[in-house]
Image (tube, helix red, strand yellow):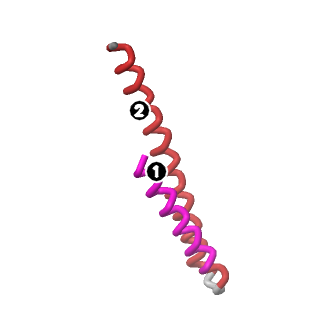
Amino acid sequence: MPLALSGALITAGVLTAGLISFRQGNSQLGQKLMRARVVVQGATVALMVGSAYYYGEHFRSSKNEN
């Protein structure tokens, strides 16, 4: 799960940068950063779901071996 934590931190960083851009009046950069945030956030969620699936299958298969 450290990759999911990294994704969450990157998402928060891009969100913060986008909000700062909007506040400074640079709406074009802010829009690009908000789009980037959506992509990073989607990748983070996909990573979390994939990790849960992988570890769930791994846990079930190791439990069946005993």
For badge 2, the amino acid type reads: Tyr
Magenta: predominant secondary structure element?
helix
For badge 1, the amino acid type reads: Ala
In reply to whether residue 26 is colored magenta, the answer given is no
Q: Residue at x 67, y 82 (%)?
A: 23
The percent position of residue 22, horizontal first and vertical second, equals 65, 79
| Residue where numbered disc 2 is placed | 55
Locate residue 15 relative to residue 9 in the image: left or right: right
Mark 2 closeness class: few <14, some 14–19, many ≥20 residues within 10 Å: few
Locate residue 61 relative to residue 56 in the image: left or right: left
Question: In the depicted view, which residue is nearer to us: 13 or 26?
Answer: 13
What label does residue 4 carry, if any? Answer: 1
Number of residue marks: 2
Compared to residue 28, the image places residue 61 above or below, namely above
Mark toward the start of the polypeptide (1 vs 2): 1
The percent position of residue 18, horizontal first and vertical second, equals 59, 73
Residue furthest bottom as drawn: 24
Q: Residue at x 49, y 39 (%)?
A: 49
Quarter of the image that includes the C terminus: top left
Compared to residue 6, the image places residue 53 above or below, namely above
Mark 1 closeness class: few <14, some 14–19, many ≥20 residues within 10 Å: some
Residues rendered magenta in the picture: 1-20
What label does residue 60 carry, if any? Answer: none
The percent position of residue 36, horizontal first and vertical second, equals 52, 64
Question: On the image, which quarter does residue 27 sit in?
Answer: bottom right
Question: In the depicted view, which residue is nearer to us: 40 or 58?
Answer: 58
Q: Residue at x 61, y 83 (%)?
A: 26
SS assignment at label 1: helix
The percent position of residue 54, horizontal first and vertical second, equals 40, 32
In reply to whether residue 5 is colored magenta, the answer given is yes
Q: Residue at x 41, y 51 (%)?
A: 2
